[in-house]
């Protein structure tokens, strides 16, 4: 498999980590000195008022933003924000359709423009996927989605494999649905900034929220256990070099 040698990847990751740490430190300093929770709560109130008075426009603006961000690796956690702002059902629809369309875009680019380079970069994974698609069919791709095998690697590799476009589409939407629902519900259970400013950190102590977070952490492990129990070896791809789940 081609790519950076191990030392090069390690240096690159350290550089990215260092830059991220500096940016986060700068953001924390700016927020601590120039941004108050009350000011943020006021902005939040304005956003919520706009969503309430312009529901359709807000929905399509939110959907457009999410669909764009779905194409950017490493932008996980968006479903929580959307659940927090839009509520459960709207957030679930936006996230599921947005991720599916984003996945289809990467799938199509991989299949029609970058198939050879993807095959060189992920030779083992492409061969593995083709082998199991022949044995388990669509259930293998569905298992990869439900087991949270990284979104940013499954999409391009699927495009380079022999899976059909429609199979990729419906397995993506269905396979990501459980995790999307959990993350959207986490956002619903989070307090508003006004509540946080009024009641302090105690407003974060919420039994359904805690249970949902535990469920979110347990879901991929449960799915991987079920996959191994029924003999679909999705866990073989866990060591691939990629980012995590993108909700």
Image (cartoon, rainbow, N blue to C red):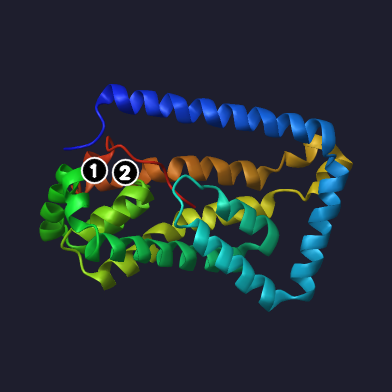
Q: Which of these two is toward me, 226 or 52?
A: 52
Q: Could you tell me residue 75's position as x and y percent?
A: 51, 47
User: Separation of disc 2 and disc 1 at Cα?
Assistant: 6 Å
Disc 1 designates what residue? 228
Image: 217 above or below 177: above
Q: Are marks 2 and 1 in contact (CB under 8 Å)?
A: yes
Left or right position of 26 against 192: left
Q: In the image, what residue occupies the spot 30% across and 58% down?
A: 142
Mark 2 lies on a secondary structure that is: helix
Closer to the camera, 178 or 35?
Answer: 35
x, y percentage for residue 67? 50, 64
Direction from residue 210 to residue 148 in the image, left or right = left
Q: Nearer the viewer, residue 17 or 191?
A: 17
Q: Residue at x 60, y 27 (%)?
A: 22
Q: Secondary structure at mark 1?
A: helix
Q: Do we see residue 70 in this rendering? A: yes
Q: Which residue is mark 2?
A: 224
């Amino acid at each position: 498999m081609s790519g950076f040698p191990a030392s090069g990847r390690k240096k690159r990751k350290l550089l990215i980590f260092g830059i991220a740490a500096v940016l986060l430190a700068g953001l924390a300093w700016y927020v601590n000195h120039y941004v108050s929770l009350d000011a943020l709560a006021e902005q939040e109130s304005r956003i919520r008022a706009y969503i309430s008075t312009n529901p359709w426009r807000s929905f399509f603006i939110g959907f457009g933003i999410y669909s764009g961000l779905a194409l950017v690796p490493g932008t996980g956690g968006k479903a929580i924000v959307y659940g927090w702002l839009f509520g459960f059902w709207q957030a679930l629809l936006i996230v599921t359709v947005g991720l599916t369309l984003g996945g289809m875009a990467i799938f199509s680019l991989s299949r029609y423009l970058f198939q050879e380079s993807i095959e060189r970069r992920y030779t083992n994974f492409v061969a593995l996927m083709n082998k199991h698609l022949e044995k388990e069919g669509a259930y293998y791709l569905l298992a990869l989605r439900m087991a949270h095998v990284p979104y940013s690697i499954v999409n391009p590799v699927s495009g380079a494999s022999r899976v059909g476009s429609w199979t990729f589409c419906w397995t993506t939407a269905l396979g990501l649905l459980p995790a999307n629902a959990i993350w959207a519900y986490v956002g619903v259970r989070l307090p508003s900034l006004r509540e946080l400013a009024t009641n302090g950190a105690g407003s974060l102590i919420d039994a359904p929220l805690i249970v949902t977070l535990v469920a979110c952490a347990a879901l991929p492990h449960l799915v991987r256990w079920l996959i191994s129990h029924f003999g679909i070896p999705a866990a073989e791809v866990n060591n691939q070099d990629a980012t995590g789940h993108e909700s």
